Image: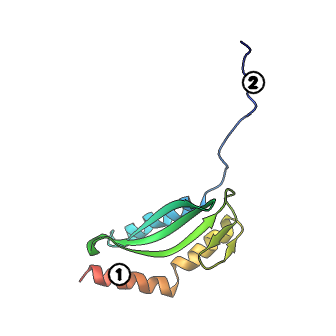
């Protein structure tokens, strides 16, 4: 029997921080900032040939109340991402700038303040 020939060549993961890894980093930081009263969680799924990543705020003390703060979608290429608002983010820098603005926005701070108040009641 003839030896098999490998046509695949070398295979290695892309050398880039993925959006989901960045989101998970921020989720972990939120838990630390709130002593885990409000936790960040990232859920990923595949829908219509896209990876969809959802960022949730979870309050364990309120029966695990979950609020979807935002979601992003990507195809097989890591970038561009499309946000739930329809914004197209072409690269990691655009994503991190968008994410920074989203997480530090007045709207997000109000949501977090309300969740903290309810959890501490």
Instruction: Tell me what residue is drawn at x 62 percent, y 62 percent.
Output: 48
**Nearest to the observer: residue 59 or residue 104:** 59
Q: Secondary structure at mark 1?
A: helix
Residue that extends furthest to the top in the rendered view of this protein: 1
Q: Quadrant of residue 2?
A: top right
Q: Nearer the viewer, mark 2 or mark 1?
A: 2
Give the side of residue 49 with respect to residue 4, left or right: left
Q: Is disc 1 surrounded by few (<14), some (14 to 19) or many (20+) residues within 10 Å?
A: some
Q: Quadrant of residue 118?
A: bottom left
The quadrant in which the C terminus is found is bottom left
Q: Is disc 2 surrounded by few (<14), some (14 to 19) or many (20+) residues within 10 Å?
A: few
Residue 117, percent from left and from top: 31, 84
Q: CA distance from mark 2 to mark 1?
A: 59 Å
Give the side of residue 3 with respect to residue 120, left or right: right
Q: Which mark is residue 37?
A: none
Instruction: Tell me what residue is drawn at x 33 percent, y 68 percent.
Output: 36
**Nearest to the observer: residue 48 or residue 66:** 48
When the figure is inspected, residue 121 is found, relative to residue 26, above or below; the finding is: below
- Mark 1 lies on residue: 115
Residue 32, percent from left and from top: 38, 67
Q: How is the image coloured?
A: rainbow
The quadrant in which the N terminus is found is top right
Q: Secondary structure at mark 2?
A: loop
Instruction: Tell me what residue is drawn at x 61 percent, y 80 percent.
Output: 85
Instruction: Tell me what residue is drawn at x 35 percent, y 81 percent.
Output: 115
- Mark 2 lies on residue: 5
**Nearest to the observer: residue 120 or residue 47:** 47
């Amino acid at each position: 029997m003839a030896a098999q020939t490998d046509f695949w060549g070398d295979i290695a993961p892309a050398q880039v921080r993925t959006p989901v890894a960045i989101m998970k980093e921020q989720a972990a930081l939120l838990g630390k900032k709130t002593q885990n009263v409000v936790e960040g969680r990232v859920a990923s799924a595949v829908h219509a040939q896209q990876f969809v990543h959802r960022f949730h705020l979870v309050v364990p003390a309120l029966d695990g109340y979950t609020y979807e703060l935002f979601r992003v979608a990507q195809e097989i290429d890591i970038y561009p991402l499309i946000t739930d608002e329809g914004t197209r983010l072409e690269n990691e820098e655009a994503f991190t700038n968008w994410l920074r603005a989203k997480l530090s926005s007045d709207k997000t701070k109000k949501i977090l303040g309300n969740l903290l108040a309810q959890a501490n009641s």
